[in-house]
Image: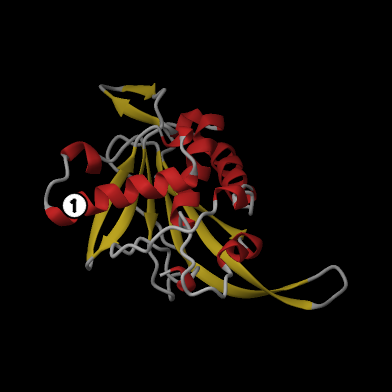
Amino acid sequence: TTHMTAEADITDLLALWKNDDPSFSPAFTLTDILVHVVARALQEFPKLNASFISGFIEEFEEIDVSVTSDLLGELYLITVFDAEKLLPSEIGAERQRIAREILSGNNTTRDVSGGTFAISVLEQPAIINQVPIIFPGHAGILGVGAVQDKYRRSENGDQLNRKVLGLTLSYDHRFINGLYAARFLQHVSENLLPSYETNMSNHSKTTVDLDFAGAHDSTR
């Protein structure tokens, strides 16, 4: 197992949540967009949507993405099935449904099964990058740190404050090589773009907080 890190500039993406109306609550969070983008990326990089079974590598047709969620101080792994077919708002609704089931003790084993690929999200502001451990049999796992403020120089020399997200891919060399891993990370980073405006809607707030810390506090 080895790992590779990258950074995604999500300044423009986070602008989606800038709203002065205190009643405004979007239909999805940054984590939901991450699940959406990763699921679509796995369609392009199927070797990462695979498992090592009985000595053989099996690529899955279904893309079931699991993502860690902090619920009342406990870390759970919530699985979104057929994630590549869902919009971020639909992913958000499914994650919140499962979270409510977990908190009420009514969740199924399938809801927290681990899926075909996993995303580990650690939202503490001091965490820039993390190197997650691959789940047994999986080809890889994506680790996500907190949103960081970084200054970048523009083309005309001005210093710009940008919002940057640290991404780390832990992967198994039995499935992929470093070039494949790099292309996957590049793809994910480049697709974290503000192309979701049409999916924004004003939903009622929930008591289950699944927001990505530091990204859009105004939505809580």
Residue 175 placed where, x, y %? Answer: 44, 31
Q: Nearer the viewer, residue 67 or 127?
A: 67
10 up-or-down from 136: above or below: below
79 lies left or right of 33 = left
Say if residue 29 shows up in the picture: yes
Residue 188 horizontal side relative to residue 116, left or right: right
Can residue 3 be seen by looking at this rendering?
A: no
* Residue 78 position within the rendered picture, expressed as x and y whole percent measured from the top left: 29, 47
Q: Residue at x 88, y 72 (%)?
A: 156
Compared with 119, 137 (above or below) is above
Drawn side of residue 93 relative to residue 54, left or right: right
- Can you identify the residue that label 1 sits on? 102
Residue at x-position 62% and y-position 65%: 15
Above or below 26: residue 60: above
For residue 77, side relative to residue 155 (left or right): left
> In the displayed image of the protein, which residue is found farthest to the right?
156
**Quadrant of the frame with the N terminus:** top left
